[in-house]
Amino acid sequence: MARSVFARPVAPRGNWRRHYVAWLVLLDTLAALAASQTVVALLADADAGFWDQRVLGNVSSFTLVANVGVPLGWLLLLVAAGAYDQRALGLGTEELKRVARANLAMAAMVSFLALGFKKDLSRATVAAIIICLLLYTLVVRFAARVVLRRVRRTGRASQKVLLVGRLSDALALHEVVTRNYGAGLHPIAIHLPHHPRPGERVNAPVPVYVGWDLVPLVQQLGADTIAVCGPASLESYELRKLAWQLEGTGLNLVVVPQVTDVTGPRIHVRPIEGLPLLNVDEPTISGLSLLAKTVLDKVTALVGLVLLSPVLLGIAVAIKASGPGPVMFRQTRIGHEGRAFKVWKFRTMYIDAEERLAALRHQNESDGLLFKIKDDPRVTPVGRHLRALSLDELPQLINVLRGQMSLVGPRPLPTEDDDYRGDVRRRLLVRPGITGLWQISGRSDLTWDDAVRLDLHYVDNWSLVYDLAILWKTASVVLARRGAY
């Protein structure tokens, strides 16, 4: 066996998953109790159907159902729906979907029990308890996610991962998961399937191993997950043998498929005689989901412009008082299907910014079609603060209201239509957005290739739920001022 000279065993950490699930059980119980108490406080006839029924001495059957039956039934349904499955916790929308399924099951169960026991329950009470259960549970789970992400930022409460595959594939996965610490994956080592060629240098941010048996190596490192990266990492029989070896060890096996950047409902596994076939559906950019997205965009933009009008007025006054020049800046951008439009923004640069651009080209810190300078001398003092909090983008709600932009989508770029060639042109299949995956994944700190990859991922996997998740994350990213300049 060839041991890496950089390798040192990593001490195993406590089982954070069990603690996190235990906290979720407690929070969900409190949410169910709060839902019951809210309904009792708001509805005078909440106990309809339970009159003059006493159990356990002076305790009414309604009190027992509200304070014991509802929380216990809610926990059982959450368990049945897989809402405590560790693979679905802390990231993505799957956890929230399972909570929603448990909520629907709760509504069905209450209806069947009322019918079976011939209870004339108040319909308002049933509806209120179902709605409160869903809202309160989602709130406590979002709060738990915030705490979990902050803990993961310190490197704790994460799966310790051994990356298996070619160095390029392993480093690509390492870059993605370390940039997204909220995913809860912490690479601690790389195992290469073959020895490097003579004279080939191996540079990696973690220890590199070659020629080890994977299960003993993982146990020595104190890892709990093996991630197989890339199509040429293991032969099919080797992957199946590895899965057998991991049975009963408590170790997780993650396989990064060759089809990347395709997720969610577009992927289906169809087994035929033990052979799993991965079906990848064509992306759907039409139908009721698109209509719902359009309605959500326009209603939110209209409400946002009305509610934020005092803020918009205050920003306009600050820009006008800071020096000569217009308050608004309008620039031609390329939008849906290559159509050009004028984007609205608050002016954040001096009025001679375009004339000074040529002299600053050599200082460009970005690549591709982007031009970015962290300390751009053309940005005004007021503009610097507006950019840090993305307040200069607020007037784009006008573009959303006019149907030129969406709340979520790829960012519109100040380029010509002919600049969008090859795969990059797929960005134009959807309306550009005020925020998007780029906004929550690094913003101006991203390279052009990363920005394109995220935009294409959004186009291939967009959904209304995905948009809502991006909007939710945008607020925390903007407030933290990550990648904004």
Image (cartoon, rainbow, N blue to C red):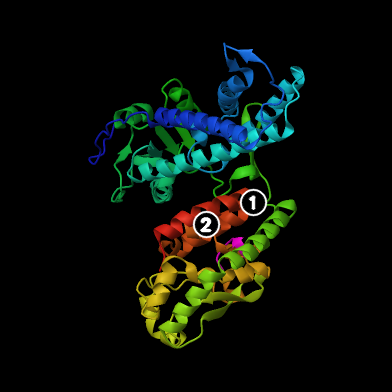
Q: Are marks 1 and 2 in contact (CB under 8 Å)?
A: no
Rendered location of residue 331, percent (x, y): 56, 79
Dot 1 falls on a residue whose secondary structure is helix
Q: Using the rendered view, name the quadrant where residue 99 is placed.
A: top right
Rendered location of residue 125, percent (x, y): 68, 33
**Left or right: where 210 falls relative to 366:** left
Q: Is residue 165 visible?
A: no
Q: Amino acid at mark 2?
A: Leu
Q: Amino acid at mark 1?
A: Leu
Residue 437 is marked as 2
Rendered location of residue 76, percent (x, y): 58, 23
Q: Does 100 appear above or below 339? A: above
Q: Using the rendered view, name the quadrant where residue 342 is placed.
A: bottom right
Residue at point 67% right, 52% down?
A: 283
Q: Earlier in the sequence, mark 1 or mark 2?
A: 2
Rendered location of residue 194, percent (x, y): 37, 40
The question of residue 346 being in magenta is answered with no
Q: Nearer the viewer, residue 409 or 38?
A: 38
Question: Which stretch is magenta?
Answer: 406-412
Label 2 packing within 10 angstroms: few (<14), some (14-19), many (20+): many
Residue at point 61% right, 18% down?
A: 60
Residue 464 is marked as 1
